[in-house]
Amino acid sequence: MLWQQLANGATMGMIYALITLGLTMVYGVLRILHISHAGIFALGGYLAVAASRVSPNLAFVTAAAMLGCGVVGVLMQRWLYRPLLAESKVVSLIASIGMFTLMEDLFRLVAGPYVLPLPVRAPFGLDQFETSHMTGNQLVVLIASAALLIAAWFIIHRTRLGLAWRATEQDFETASAFGVNIDRAVGTNFLLGSAIAGAAGALVGFYYNSVYPTMGSVPAYKAMAIAVLGGLGNVWGTVVASLILGLVETFLVISPAGLILPRDSIAFVALILVLLFRPHGLFGRR
Amino acid sequence: MGLYQATVAITVGIFMMLAMGLNIITGYTGQVSLGHAAFFGIGAYTSALLSVKAGMSFWLALPIAAAVTAAIGAILGAISTRLHDDSLAITTIGINFVVVSVFQYTQFFGGALGVGGIEYPSVLGRTLTKPEYLIVVVVCVLLGIWFDRRLVRSWLGLALRAVGQNEEAAESLGVPSAKFKISAFAIGTAYAGVAGSLYAHFMTFISARDFGFPTSISIISMAVFGGLGTLRGAILGSLALGLAPEIFRPLVNYRNLMYGALLLLMMRFQPRGLIGDGSLIWEWLRSIATRRRKAQCAPGGEHDGWQS
Amino acid sequence: MRNPFRWLLIAFTGLVVCSLAVSVISADPIKIGLHAPLTGFAAADGLSVRQSVELAVKQINEAGGINGRPIQLVTYDDRADAKEAVAVAAKLIEQDKVAAVVGGSYSAPMRAVAPIYQQARLPMVAGFAVHPDITRAGDFVFRVGMLGPIEGAAAGEVVGKLLKAKTACQMTMDNDFGRALAEGFRARAAVLGIKIVWETLYPLGEMDFTPYLARLRQLNPDVVFTSGYYNEAAQFCKQAKEMGLKSQILGEEGFDSPKFIEIAGKAAENVIIVTNLNRDDARPAARAFIDGYRKLYKMEPDMVGASNYDAFLVIADALRRAKSTDAKVIRDAIASTRNFDGATGTISGFNALGECTKPIQAQIVKDGQFRYYGEVSDLAIITPPDK
């Protein structure tokens, strides 16, 4: 049973990591609490459903979701956040909340309030792979998210684009002085972050065979908690925090402690405890 | 005044108290609190339990609930001194969740069944009607406004604003920001406690879900929509966003959409809120006031140095 | 950027004016109110409720109405939120002046408005809200749905008598309904000698059951009694199949939705549930709902819809007998309902509290459809408390 539980926890952890990665990337550069990130996550699920009508291949629908969400993410940044940079941070936050509410209701109006299934198959029939320690679906999610996270790491730490982001994170003016096109850096940052959220939406939709309008509600705040836990803006911190949370939740819910503390609160309790001792999160630098 | 109008007005009044209190914490003192509904809940449950389990009358339960909420708010304020900006905002979400979980899962607080049978307030043995209850709510709101105006003009108010504008500068001038953050939380959450008590005795039944994160979002949206940092903003914002669901009711299916759109568009095009400092409407009102002053000053005179 | 805002301001004002201008014009019809969670997290159930009650209204009006007068349904969205429901109640009572109300929303909002309707002396029939205090608000409040402890006890019956199982585990959803179900199940299991090997709570909205299933797989009981709404139900069954759980899964009315089968896919096969709606029911009242719903909406009906369909028909039936729209007369007519044939079964009557007695169905999923499996009609089990 232990191996199965580890697989359970790791899978949840990877899912959390995918969802939170985009959020922490955006925060790193713009210092905005981008709640509508969860809306983009849900959009990924819906785009995957639409794409599944064309081809029931998981890789295909995930790519479609990533493309669509990347574009929407950039549009959102251009139209909503860029003009609000000069204002107080609360304004961006409320604007983001308004956008998220809008998105949720649009999903409901366009696609209906009911849960939609996502009938796709993973490549190489991986989702049929059965062992007593892990289900096929879990294997697919683990592989896909690992691939995406490694790709993200590569882009952030081994390319000039990533360098531009990290420079922008430090200081807008200095980066600009060194020739970084801030506007493009922020735009591409949103693009990648949103694309990854879209992939998360597709994968989660596949894993649970469920896409529904309010699927972003829990990730909206949980991802925030994880992002802060890992240290806002720190990509590695996010991944580590996500995995820890996934495992902790899994082992805690079936223990006696699980009867007192509901699963979704665990993230916040952990957050409050950690922040009491390390106000910048586990790995925060600022 | 009919039942429906009184009902809606009471609800708006309660949220006005909440928005005003949050404005003191987030608007004046700059401490972003996304979990204000937790204190709304603490006030409500305190008042409810005092009424249901101890048979206390509403008139006594309300001030006690406010005091209890303020005390707990002060503790949160103490925690907040260690955190900054976004970490604080997210932690307040966490506090909201934890508080709601406590209400939801502890039998003492009624658990999933909530607390029901809360006494409707009565005066001299006669139960108040809804319009009469509205008068009670209005009185509380007016007291809240009066207190806010006194606060703003006091030394405490100045200190709070200093911390809100620029904490480092304030500290360098000798303002102990930690102490004042705690005061801000205590005062702002006291408002929430009063609102909670009013809510509990109005609904006669409360459950944990009434005080969750979505409610916190509603409250801060009202304050920001109206114009964060201003009392008039909190009042107008709660009026507008409180009445909007009822006004849009005939649009049935599109209500939520309208609400989200309203919020989004307001923030996008008028980030200072409906009537906050720097907003279209407020600047226009001020320009009228200045023009009047100019006209009074010198009919046909040369006072042209004044900019509105 | 000021110009857009001016236009938005004008548009907004226009919208407000339009909304205020949209008023309901009526003279002759009988108005009945409906609370439903049309938007928000419960929107799916809200849609079921609205469609089902509208189906009933359509069927009645097409057959000539009630004593010659058509029914006009006044529906308001309460978002499954208590304070919205309170505003809706005030509106229905004072502005729309309805003759009776169908309470088609969740427990918390219904619990909040029950005292309001009682005080206003307006009859309200709740469809599927389960909070026990709803009917305790007074004699103007009735309920058509099943109470948690009774349904749980029926589940126990199914385990003991129909499945003849000896060991069981309980996965309880952590809300008032789930806990009530668990209580009823536990009590009945004790009487029948079924051993509950493990039981645990899980939070509402949970999607990941793998931690629990790992434990359940290890314990391997005969039956796992799981409570949940269709989302959780589908996830539980799907993941159970993926993880190779051998135990028989027994669910409850929350599972009763075509969505459960759609999402769980093959994993839904052979799942048994205790519920209110028998798809194979031959009675005309049941067929009118099931076939009528399928025909009008091109989708499968569910228990949520069926319960509220019946709640409405109870009111309609009372109106027919009362021959008046006086609230007290209607209330008395509802209270004196006898052997009412509804989609969810034959209601023998309402007790002093306003609760009803009717047999509980057990359905099994076969070939992607709910089919008849059994029935629990032992009065000792299905009779609700009367105070």
Image: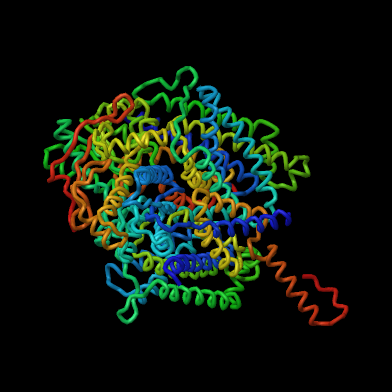
Relative image position of residue B102 (x, y in whole percent): 36, 55
Position of the N terminus of chain C, as image quadrant, is: bottom right
The answer to whether residue A269 is visible is yes
Query: Residue at point 55% right, 32% down?
Result: A47
Q: In front: B230, or C273?
A: C273
Q: In front: A199, or C91?
A: C91
Query: Residue at point 41% right, 69% down?
Result: B198
Dividing the picture into quadrants, the one containing residue C260 is top left
As drawn, which residue projects farthest toward the top?
A: A124
Q: In front: C93, or C380?
A: C93
Relative image position of residue C367 (x, y in whole percent): 31, 24
Relative image position of residue A102 (x, y in whole percent): 56, 47
Relative image position of residue A133 (x, y in whole percent): 36, 25
Query: Residue at point 20% right, 35% down?
Result: C168
Q: How many marks?
A: 0
Position of the C terminus of chain C, as image quadrant, is: bottom left
Dividing the picture into quadrants, the one containing residue C161 is top left
Q: In front: A172, or B227?
A: B227
State left or right for residue B295 relative to residue C90: right
Q: Is residue A65 above or below residue C186?
A: above
Dividing the picture into quadrants, the one containing residue C136 is bottom left
State left or right for residue C362 relative to residue B159: left
